[in-house]
Image (tube, rainbow, N blue to C red):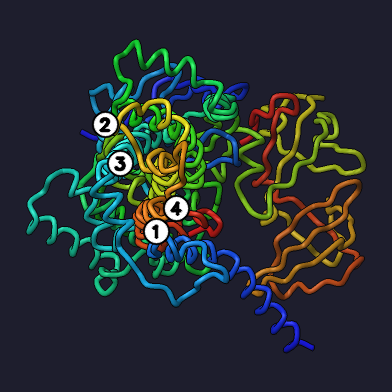
């Protein structure tokens, strides 16, 4: 009975894994298939003639190198900014609580982003920031900031104030205590929060769409959507771009995995 | 000059007044213990001295210098926390070296001093370990080493032994006393443990509700408590209290059915008919199996053998009187006994104010 249950569990897991991985496999193979093979019936699971044509198409004929760079710049700069400012705010909120303030900070993320599009567009136009990566950095920073504050505040609250008080007694300023004692201790939390911000900014579509008017500020998600044109859908190019967009996040997540798991469970076990 | 003077400190947290007009002097190289029940403000007092809290009013003087508004680092005091507060991401060596690092001490000198402090506290073999790989006692030693690695203006101890198990606590207590004696650094030690309070300090300050109840050498505070609170707080088992009044004509103290004979000195000090509370420590209650002149009859309510002594609760009149007797005195429940309060060891307190009237 027990053996049977275990077998059933394994089977269920196998189905779940397959359901998760199949679309990825399909995307990856699609990006390597010639157009005639793309919609062959029955589908060509393995036996197709691979081609790099779609990859060279997006990087040579289309400006995907630029999009990739734009996405990376917007995501990384905004993540760093949000992390730096949000961590400082979270620390002060954790140590000098202002009732309700943390909630109001988070509440800025409770409305659907689309309602802010028109005012944001007008503001950006007024500031001369339309069609610039700087605008995206600014927007993503602003929109990730509440999450950083909220997440990091929780981690700081888990940390006993004794440690930074000890550091201050040992001769540090409060800032020195934060830098030398507190931040090293919440490194896993910082990693998890950074990954969170990075993924959100990397995949963001709506703001990127209204900011980008030319290739100058075009990011990957908008660029990929642009392969759906009025007359045709460039499945091969879209798939190739999709793979290109996924890889960095995938690598980052793999690199950070150790930290992230600790970050997500930080505070669950008192050290 | 490292005499410390706390002058009329007040500190309020919301509705509670943690310190009210609190003044205390700590002499140079003195080991002063601050004792009190939880919530009496003793930790606030320590943290205010450390600079981790700012008083609402009052001053703190270090020698001649007013340090009231200074940051903790500008006061140069070392603190040992109840939780040890070791830096988990640093090993033992780095933990001890941390205060020196901040002071930009040259590496060979810092290294020498860390090893010296570590050797003094038996940590020489553990320098590479992380705090989580240490036992509670070892962690406490690291915290102490981190405090003594430099020569601070003062040591501040915030219940440093209360997380240790009983046996280790007694060992560390003696070690700590020796350490402070050797280093001669002015120390303020906060605790709610009266054994620590009695044994460690050259002087003992008892706090209650944000004010100083009494300060003096431990033996004096124990034998001549200034008020009923101090009398009841120090000593285990606690002092017995009997509320009653003085009967001048019969030359005795009367409480319900109980009567205790008084001397002429007592009567002169207490006055006739005054409502007073008699206090007597358990070790000053004599217990016998036979009746005697002026002895009070009672029954054993419970008897606890401690090996080296017997703790007895005797039901006499409406009171349960705690007594400490020789271990040979084995008594069953309900056994009839007679008790007497040693006349030269009586305490009397004003019943309404709690102020000590005698001795």
Q: Which residue is mark 3?
A: A67
Q: Crowding near pointer 3: few (<14 within 10 Å), some, many (20+)? A: many
Q: Which residue is mark 2?
A: A216
Residue A55, position in %: x, y? 30, 56
Pointers 3 and 2 in contact (CB under 8 A)?
Answer: no
Query: In the drawing, does residue A186 fall left or right of residue B182?
Result: right
Chain ID, mark 1: A
Residue at 52% across / 57% down in the picture? A265
Chain ID, mark 3: A
Would you place residue A185 above or below residue A226 in this image? below
The residue mark sitting in front, 4 or 1, is 4
Decide which of tag 3 and tag 1 comes sooner along the chain: 3
Would you place residue A138 above or below residue B173 in this image? above
The residue mark sitting in front, 2 or 4, is 4
Decide which of tag 3 and tag 4 comes sooner along the chain: 3
Chain ID, mark 2: A
Q: Which residue is mark 4?
A: A235
Query: In the drawing, does residue B114 fall left or right of residue A47?
Result: left
Can marks 3 and 2 be said to lie on one chain? Answer: yes
């Amino acid at each position: 009975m027990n053996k049977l249950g275990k077998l059933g569990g394994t089977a269920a897991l196998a189905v779940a894994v397959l359901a998760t991985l199949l679309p990825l496999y399909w995307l990856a193979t699609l990006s390597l298939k010639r157009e005639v093979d793309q919609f062959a019936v029955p589908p060509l699971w393995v036996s197709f003639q691979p081609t790099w044509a779609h990859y060279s198409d997006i990087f040579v004929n289309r400006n995907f190198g630029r999009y990739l760079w734009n996405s990376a710049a917007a995501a990384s700069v905004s993540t760093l900014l949000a992390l730096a400012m949000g961590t400082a705010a979270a620390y002060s909120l954790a140590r000098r609580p202002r009732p309700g303030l943390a909630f109001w900070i988070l509440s800025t993320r409770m409305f659907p982003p689309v309602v802010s599009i028109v005012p944001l567009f007008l503001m950006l136009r007024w500031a001369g920031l339309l069609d610039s990566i700087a605008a995206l950095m600014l927007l993503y920073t602003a929109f990730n900031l509440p999450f950083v504050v909220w997440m990091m505040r929780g981690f700081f609250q888990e940390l006993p104030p004794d440690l930074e008080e000890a550091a201050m007694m040992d001769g540090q300023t409060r800032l020195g205590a934060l830098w030398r004692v507190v931040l090293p201790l919440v490194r896993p939390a910082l990693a998890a929060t950074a990954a969170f911000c990075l993924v959100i900014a990397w995949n963001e579509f709506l703001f990127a769409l209204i900011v980008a008017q030319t290739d100058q500020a075009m990011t990957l998600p908008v660029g990929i959507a642009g392969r759906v044109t009025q007359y045709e859908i460039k499945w091969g190019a879209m798939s190739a771009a999709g793979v290109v967009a996924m890889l960095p996040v995938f690598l980052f997540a793999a690199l950070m995995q150790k930290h992230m798991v600790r970050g997500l469970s930080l505070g669950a076990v008192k050290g | 000059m490292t005499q410390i003077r706390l002058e009329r400190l007040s500190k309020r947290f919301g509705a509670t007044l943690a310190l009210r007009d609190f003044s205390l002097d700590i002499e140079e190289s003195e080991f002063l213990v601050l004792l009190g029940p939880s919530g009496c403000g003793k930790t606030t007092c320590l943290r205010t001295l450390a600079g981790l809290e700012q008083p609402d009013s009052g001053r703190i003087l270090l020698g001649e210098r007013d340090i009231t508004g200074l940051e903790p680092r500008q006061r140069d005091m070392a603190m040992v926390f109840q939780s040890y507060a070791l830096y988990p991401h640093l090993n033992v060596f780095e933990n001890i070296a941390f205060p020196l690092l901040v002071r930009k001490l040259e590496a060979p000198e810092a290294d020498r001093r860390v090893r010296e402090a570590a050797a003094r506290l038996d940590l020489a073999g553990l320098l590479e370990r992380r705090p989580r790989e240490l036992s509670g006692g070892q962690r406490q030693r690291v915290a102490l080493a981190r405090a003594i690695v430099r020569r601070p203006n003062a040591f501040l101890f915030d219940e440093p032994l209360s997380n240790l198990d009983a046996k280790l606590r007694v060992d560390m207590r003696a070690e700590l006393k020796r350490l402070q004696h050797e280093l001669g650094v002015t120390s303020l030690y906060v605790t709610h443990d009266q054994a620590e309070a009695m044994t460690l300090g050259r002087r003992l300050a008892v706090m209650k509700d944000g004010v100083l109840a009494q300060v003096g050498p431990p033996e004096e505070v124990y034998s001549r408590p200034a008020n009923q609170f101090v009398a009841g707080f120090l000593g285990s088992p606690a002092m017995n209290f009997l509320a009653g009044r003085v009967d001048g004509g019969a030359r005795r103290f009367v409480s319900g059915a109980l009567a205790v004979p008084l001397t002429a000195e007592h009567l002169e000090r207490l006055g006739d008919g005054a409502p007073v509370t008699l206090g007597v420590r358990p070790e000053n209650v004599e217990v016998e199996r036979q009746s005697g002149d002026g002895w009070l009859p009672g029954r054993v309510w419970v008897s606890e053998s401690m090996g080296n002594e017997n703790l007895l609760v005797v039901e006499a009149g409406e009171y349960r009187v705690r007594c400490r007797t020789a271990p040979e005195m084995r008594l069953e429940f309900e056994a009839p006994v007679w008790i007497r309060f040693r006349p030269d060891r009586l305490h009397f307190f004003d019943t309404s104010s709690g102020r000590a009237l005698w001795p």
